[in-house]
Image (cartoon, rainbow, N blue to C red):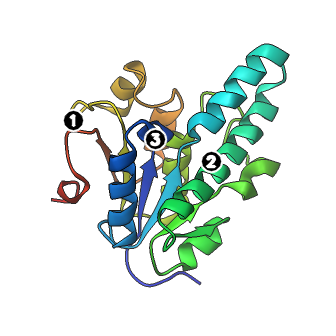
Amino acid sequence: MAAPGPVSVVKVGGSLLADAPRLHSVLARLADGAEGRAVIVPGGGPFAEAVRTSQAALGYSDALAHRLALDAMGRMAEVFCEIAPRLAIVHSVEAAAAHEAPCLWAPAALRAGHPGIPESWDVTSDSLALWLAAALGATRCLLLKSAPCPAGASPEALARLGLVDRAFPDFARRFSGEIFLQGPDLPLQDAAA
């Protein structure tokens, strides 16, 4: 059963680990309800980078790398929960929909595969945030980035600039809500203004 009220999806990139004060502030504000009832999608951060490095060294398949990157997102959810303990971790779309307070999504349920999600590096936590937003019927999807984001850029332009993954434009077409990218130049409270 879905919790009442609109939901937002907020992707917090693992790259924000390079700015620990900002990451702590962002997670605290999200836990306080800065985005209302939000489901937070963690990037894989250094855990996902370890997957990329080990795949390059060992030559395993993109399908396995994708599943390991999903695990990396789950590990980052645990880190975020340690930083902001009021944020519970949910493991499925159904649990995210039912949760009444801001929460963290660990995509463990996707390890078995999903027909709408290619298992490749073309799909990262950026596209997974959009996929989750569409699955939840979210009103908006906000992606917090460590790099400046050009205002008004199309999903295709953002992918060309390397600010989002290559599959992002396809997932953007499947999401009917608003999509925002926010770099380090704006504080979180200005995102909804």
Q: Quadrant of residue 58?
A: top right
Kindly identify the amino acid type of the residue bearing the numbered disc 2: Met
Kindly identify the residue that appears in the image at 33 percent across and 48 percent down: 22
Q: Are marks 2 and 3 in contact (CB under 8 Å)?
A: no
User: To which residue does mark 1 refer?
Assistant: 152
The CA distance from mark 1 to mark 3 is 26 Å
User: To which residue does mark 2 refer?
Assistant: 73
Mark in front: 1 vs 3: 3
In the displayed structure image, the side of residue 105 where residue 23 appears, left or right: left
Q: What is the tally of numbered marks visible in this picture?
A: 3
Task: State whether residue 131 is above or below residue 103.
Answer: above
Percent from the top left, x then y, of residue 7? 41, 69
Point out the tag, 1 or 3, that comes first from the N-terminus: 3
Point out the tag, 2 or 1, that comes first from the N-terminus: 2
Percent from the top left, x then y, of residue 30? 37, 65
Graded by Cα atoms within 10 Å as few (under 14), some (14 to 19) or many (20 or more), the crowding at tag 2 reads: many
The CA distance from mark 2 to mark 1 is 28 Å
Q: Secondary structure at mark 3?
A: helix
Marking on residue 17: 3
Residue situated in front as seen by the camera: 11 or 122: 11
Point out the tag, 2 or 3, that comes first from the N-terminus: 3
Mark in front: 2 vs 1: 2
Kindly identify the residue that appears in the image at 45 percent across and 34 percent down: 169
